[in-house]
Image (spheres, rainbow, N blue to C red):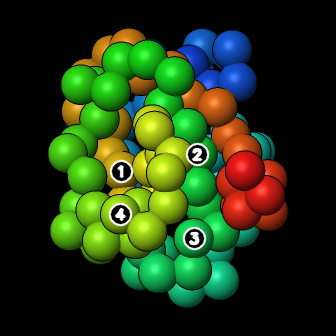
Amino acid sequence: MSQVIVSIDGKPVMAEKNSTLSDIFKVNDIAVTQFCGGQGVCTACHCLVLGGAAALSKPTEQEQMMFSKIDRPGARYACQARVVDNGAMLQTTPARVLAKK
C-alpha cells in the first residue's frame, strides 16, 4: 500500500493511503475517543482540517448530517475521514471543546 504524509498538530507523520484518521491517530499514539465504535454518531472523534482538505475523502452522509447541526468549518470525524493524498493538515480537538464554541 502507498504512503502519504499528514500533518497532525503541526507534526508530519507517514500514513497508509486510504486509512481513516482514527487509524492514523492510533498508530501514532494520539488519543482518540470513540464511544460509537467508528459509526460516526457520537461526535467524540472530531478533528479540524486546517488545510489540505482535498487530501481527504469527501465527507460521508453521516458527517454531513451531523455537521449540519453545528457551525464548525473544517470539522471532520476521524472515524469517517480517510486520507487519500499528501497534504492534509489536522488539529486534534476534543469534542468537549467543540461543544463549547
Q: Mark 4 points at which residue?
A: 68
Q: Name the residue under label 2.
A: 47
Q: Mark 3 points at which residue?
A: 43
- Residue found at x 23% / y 25%: 54
The residue carrying pointer 4 sits among few (fewer than 14), some (14 to 19) or many (20 or more) residues within 10 Å by Cα, namely: few
> Sequence-wise, which precedes: disc 2 or disc 1?
2
Q: How far apart are marks 2 and 3 (CA)?
A: 10 Å
Q: Secondary structure beneath disc 4?
A: loop
Q: Nearer the viewer, mark 1 or mark 4?
A: 4
- Residue found at x 69% / y 14%: 10
- For residue 81, the mark is 1
Q: Nearer the viewer, mark 2 or mark 4?
A: 4
Q: Which of marks 3 and 4 is in front?
A: 4
Residues at badges 2 and 3 in contact (C-beta under 8 Å)?
no
Of 41 and 30, nearer the camera is 41
Q: In this view, does 66 lie above or below 1?
A: below
Q: Secondary structure beneath disc 3?
A: loop
> Sequence-wise, which precedes: disc 2 or disc 4?
2
- The answer to whether residue 45 is left or right of residue 32 is left
Q: How far apart are marks 2 and 4 (CA)?
A: 16 Å
- For residue 27, the mark is none
What amino acid does circle 1 point to?
Ala
- Residue found at x 50% / y 61%: 70
What amino acid does circle 4 point to?
Ser
Residues at badges 1 and 3 in contact (C-beta under 8 Å)?
no
What amino acid does circle 3 point to?
Thr
**Quarter of the N terminus within the rendering:** top left
Q: Secondary structure beneath disc 1?
A: loop
Measuring from the top left, give residue 76's x and y in whole percent.
45, 49
- The answer to whether residue 55 is left or right of residue 46 is left
> Sequence-wise, which precedes: disc 1 or disc 4?
4
Residues at badges 2 and 1 in contact (C-beta under 8 Å)?
yes
